[in-house]
Amino acid sequence: MAAGGPAGGRGDGQGGLRAALSGLTTRGRSFLAAGVAAAVCAYALGQADLLRVGLLLAALPLICTLVVYRTRHQVTSSRGLSPARVPATTESRVRLRVDNVSRLPTGLLMLQDRVPYVLGPRPRFVLDRVQPGGRREVSYRVRSDLRGRYPLGPLQLRLTDPFGMCELTRSFTAYDTLTVVPRTEPLPPVRLSGEAAGYGDGRQRSLALAGEDDVIPRGYRHGDDLRRVHWRSTARYGELMVRREEQPQRARCTVLLDTRRTAYQGAGPDSAFEWAVSGAASTLVHMLERGYAVRLLTDTGSSVPGEGSDGFAGATQDSADSAGLMMDTLAVVGHSDGESLSPAYDVLRGGNEGLLVAFVGDLDKEQAAVAARMRQRSGAAVAFVLDSADWARGGVQDSAGPAAEQADDRLRRLREAGWTALAVKPGTALADLWRQAGQESTAGPVGGTTAGTGGWS
């Protein structure tokens, strides 16, 4: 919540008074001029009654200016967003509150909040007088079809007196930020072939380094293999104990987002790049909700700021915090100037990266070969490949043309390397492709290669 203090915009000495006098309206200037003229004429003609009328006319706008100028420093404002992070095309409510901390009532108040044009027109409100110690609250809604971070504010406050003699504008300095994250969609639970069944200690396991003498037993759980019963510990503790021969290891998932400028054509909410960003966001949320340690990786080799040394989020942080961190990153991600996926390939260390889900754009033969080698550094790999030219044409493509042959060739290269590669057509829902990827993975790899092991759900 942003707030503007009562001291903001205070003027000092003659400079402040000149600024206040500059706020006289046409009516106020007319009254002042008429009063001065009447006073001069009264002095010249010796008319005392006319002099009193002239002084009254001249004093009224000056008194109104003084009251408004003093009220200017006794009004505070605050702003609140609910929520401060919203998906694209979703509305957020902005609440403005104005407090009168002076001992005098205010005049007519006109509020105008500055918002980017993407969020809509600037909201304006007119408030009647606010009693001493009183407050007024107003609200408006903002909505954006484009992801990003948008500043709201500062608030502009126009004060006027009941007679309309003076009008002053005050700008507060505080502002808030609305974060518009990519749209996400719920994904169905699917399973890749080769996922470990386990005994319930974890999705993935590694053998314990301790021998029989150093075994650390635990209590028996329903479904444990009776061959794992440790009889010596059972006799010592008086209850059935089993050997902890395997150490639980949290399942990992790396979501790779291709942001190369050369890999995408077109722009806007319905472009191929925005679909890829939205797909990456949906995958991140889906995997975090199912207990995976997730890493967001781009073609430049950079990950989400603030992650652990292994680059995975969710293992030591709360899943909601991890999701918010990565969604904030995706809210402002843009095209990179790189032309290769090699930096991302170098980040993948090999063998222990778990599941790899990639959203890639156009791939030439060289980049398709780099992507194919990435498969060797993950347990299981799924690629959603977007043909940006097809998206730019709205899905109208010659199925027998060179572009179609090139698209089929890169899919074939990825599948031969062990990827579960799917072509993304314009307007296709990610949930349908997600389900299709699970079916193709269960049916077996294409091209006769072994897909390896790794699970997702």
Image (cartoon, rainbow, N blue to C red):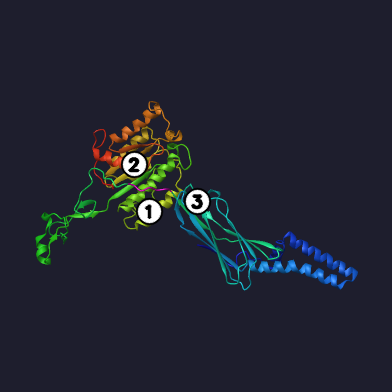
Residue 168 location, quadrant: bottom right
Q: Residue at x 85, y 67 (%)?
A: 40
Residue 234 location, quadrant: bottom left
Going from N to C along the chain, the mark reached first, 1 or 2, is 1
Q: Nearer the viewer, residue 163 or 284?
A: 163
Element under label 1? helix
Q: Amino acid at mark 2?
A: Asp
- Extent of the magenta region: 182-187
Q: Which residue is labeled 2 in the image?
A: 432
Closer to viewer: mark 1 or mark 3: 3
What is the magenta segment's predominant secondary structure? loop
Magenta span includes 186: yes
Query: Residue 417: where, in percent of width, then height?
Result: 28, 36
Element under label 2? helix
Element under label 3? loop
Q: Amino acid at mark 1?
A: Ala
Q: Residue furthest right?
A: 45
Going from N to C along the chain, the mark reached first, 2 or 3, is 3
Q: Nearer the viewer, residue 369 or 135?
A: 135
Horizontal side of 8 relative to 418 (left or right) equals right
Callout 2 touching callout 3 (CB < 8 Å): no
Callout 1 touching callout 3 (CB < 8 Å): no
Q: Residue at x 57, y 58 (%)?
A: 154
Please give the label number shown on residue 143.
Answer: 3
Query: Residue 201: where, in percent of width, then height?
Result: 21, 55
Please give the label number shown on residue 323.
Answer: 1
Q: Residue at x 74, y 63 (%)?
A: 28
Query: Residue 163: where, in percent of width, then height?
Result: 71, 65
Q: On screen, 43 above or below 267?
A: below
Q: Residue furthest front?
A: 128
Q: On screen, 206 above or below 49?
A: above
